[in-house]
């Protein structure tokens, strides 16, 4: 199975095959609107704007599993991200990233790139996975890793000059 075999729902509830991102690098992030890391939306949007022409897609997946910090529905989430952070990268429907109802996308990501000490479980909002243009999971970053701190890895992946 490849990441391109997975389908997800976008923020409007429409089915999206990840195959449409084939040939592009992806930064996949579980997000929340009421988290201490929420200001990272600004950095993620900045990364998106500066790298999308080179082939980077940022995919935001709202999740309410950590401290109930994403209580709104998809419309509220979309409005919040656009109004407060000018988010233009794709947002998706709210998902679970751990447990019995976890998204198959996160099952895939965690099985291909474990966290510190080999843990699979997502620990908090704004955990980031970097996927190369061939669909390989090449990086996993803790919530504390700011988007600008991983720009060098993205530049290297895209073959851009830092």
Image: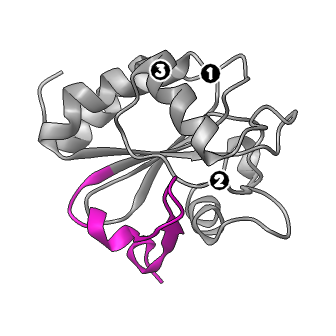
**Nearer the observer, 40 or 148:** 40
Q: Residue at x 47, y 46 (%)?
A: 91
Mark 1 neighbour class, 10 Å CA radius: few under 14, some 14 to 19, many 20 or more? some
Sequence-wise first label, 2 or 1: 1
Between the C-alphas of marks 1 and 3, the distance is 13 Å
What SS does tag 1 mark? loop
- Of labels 2 and 3, the one closer to you: 3
Magenta range: 1-25
Q: Are marks 2 and 1 in contact (CB under 8 Å)?
A: no
Q: Which residue is mark 2?
A: 114
Residue 14 percent location from the top left of the image? 47, 67
Q: Is residue 46 above or below residue 87?
A: above
- Please report the residue visible at 52 percent of the width from the left and 68 percent of the height from the top: 8
Residue underneath mark 1: 38
Q: CA distance from mark 2 to mark 1?
A: 23 Å
Find out whether residue 147 is within the magenta segment.
Answer: no
Residue 11 location, x and y as percent?
52, 52
- In the displayed structure, would residue 63 be above or below residue 131? above
Tell me where residue 38 sits by quadrant: top right
Which residue does the image show at 74% across and 65% down from the upper left?
A: 102
Up the image or down, 48 lies above or below 6; here it is: above
Q: Position of residue 80 (x, y in %)?
A: 56, 27
The residue labelled by disc 3 is 83
Does residue 153 appear left or right of residue 30 in this picture? left
């Amino acid at each position: 199975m490849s990441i391109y075999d997975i389908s997800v729902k976008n923020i409007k509830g429409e089915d999206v095959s990840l195959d449409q991102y084939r040939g592009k690098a992806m930064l996949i992030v579980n997000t929340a609107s009421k988290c201490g890391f929420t200001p990272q939306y600004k950095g993620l949007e900045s990364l998106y704007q500066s790298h999308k022409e080179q082939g980077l897609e940022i995919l935001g997946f709202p999740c309410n599993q950590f401290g109930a910090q994403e209580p709104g529905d998809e419309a509220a989430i979309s409005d919040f991200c656009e109004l407060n952070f000018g988010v233009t990268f794709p947002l998706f429907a709210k998902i679970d990233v751990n447990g019995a109802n976890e998204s198959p996308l996160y099952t895939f990501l965690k099985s291909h790139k474990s966290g510190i000490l080999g843990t699979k479980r997502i620990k908090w909002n704004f955990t980031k996975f970097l996927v190369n243009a061939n669909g390989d999971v090449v990086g996993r970053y803790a919530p504390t890793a700011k988007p600008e701190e991983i720009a060098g890895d993205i530049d290297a992946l895209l073959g851009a000059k830092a």
